[in-house]
Each structure stands twice: as C-alpha cells, then as structure tokens.
Image (spheres, rainbow, N blue to C red):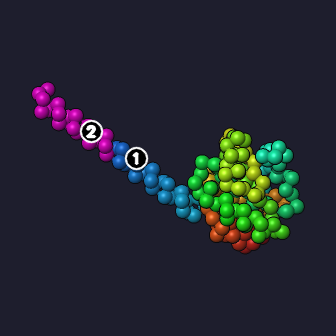
Amino acid sequence: MSGIWLVSYIALWAIVLFQGVVIFVLLRQLGVIYLGTARGVANDGLAVGTEAPDFSVRGLDGEPLSLASFKGAPLLLIFGSPTCAPCRGLIPDLNAFARDRAEELRVLFLSRSDDESTRRFASEQSIEVPIAAHPDEELPNKYEARVTPFGFLVDDGGVIRAKGLANNREHLELLLRNAATVS
C-alpha cells in the first residue's frame, strides 16, 4: 500500500470508530431520558396489587427491620443510594413528608450500600426516617426496583398500593393519591 492509501484507510477507520462511539452515546442518552419519564419506569417494580415480599434488614441502630414489623400501618418503602444525586435531593422532602404524615404511615429508606456508607450518608443528609443498608441486589431484585429513588406504598395488609419514582415531595404525594384511587 502506498502512503496515501494507508492514511486514507486509517482515517476511514477512525471515522467509523468515532461514529460508533457517537451512536453508542446517543442511544445511551435516549435510554437515560426514557428511564427518567413516568412511562419509562411504569413497568419497574412489582405490580400494584401484588403482595409485597417480606425482607429482613438491620437498621443503622442495629434493630432488625422486616415488612412484618410494619404490619398494621401503611409503609412507604424508598429504595435509594448514597451515590444517587436525586436521592440526596429527596431527603429534605422525605423528612418533611414523614413528619407531616406520621399519623397516616411509616417510612423506611432502604439504602443500596454498605453500613458505613449508609451511616455517613444518613449523617450528612440528616435523615430522620428509619434507614437500613442492603449491600447486595437481593432486596431490589425482590421488588424489581431498577432505578433510585423508587418508592412503594404498601398498605397495612402488606399489599403494594402504589409505586413510582420518588424524586421530590410531589412524587411522594402522588404515591399517596395513587394508592387512594386503587384502594
């Protein structure tokens, strides 16, 4: 191959690789945008009307927590993570929501992390609701929760009455309204 053909051959392959990277980035961004919509997460999580799977975790205070320990009162389960920016933004709203609705329901934040990271997160964010760490994917897999923060409103009988993204106070209120229309 002469010099000009070799240069054009390399340039052509560089263009093809660059286009491949651009296509990958665009498809990934479309997926992120889709997951950020209500329609994108409507299929996430166990179906409304399904019995919520029991779980057993330890709160940061060392006390065992399970779905059964919350029976008799509606429970808002929030799946989150210390590395999730929307989760960090949710905490002030979640604290206020839990205080305002303390007579109606209980709240549990399930942190997808180890105890140490969860403890640091709870301290930095001044989390007022009960929080428990679950370092593996077993619990989110049981609930089919792929994105965070994701919430499930479980009624006093252990049945999921509402589910969805929980990025702010409006989303938390929407979970309550959706549960009321299902009941």
Residue at image coords 58%, 54%: 85
Residue drawn at x 42%, y 51% is: 27
Where disc 2 sits, the SS reads helix
Can the viewer see residue 136 in this picture? yes
Residue that carries the numbered disc 2 in the rendered image: 14
Who is closer to the viewer here, 70 or 103?
Answer: 103
Residue hosting label 1? 24
Horizontal and vertical percent position of residue 123: 70, 50
Image position, residue 58 (x, y; %): 80, 44
* Camera sees residue 50: no
Residue type pointed to by label 2: Ala
Let me know if residue 13 is in the magenta part: yes
Mark 1: which amino acid? Phe
Taking the magenta stretch, the answer to whether it contains residue 58 is no
The dot on residue 10 is none
Give residue 14's position: percent from left, percent from top. 27, 38
Q: Which residues are magenta?
A: 1-19
Circle 1 SS class: helix
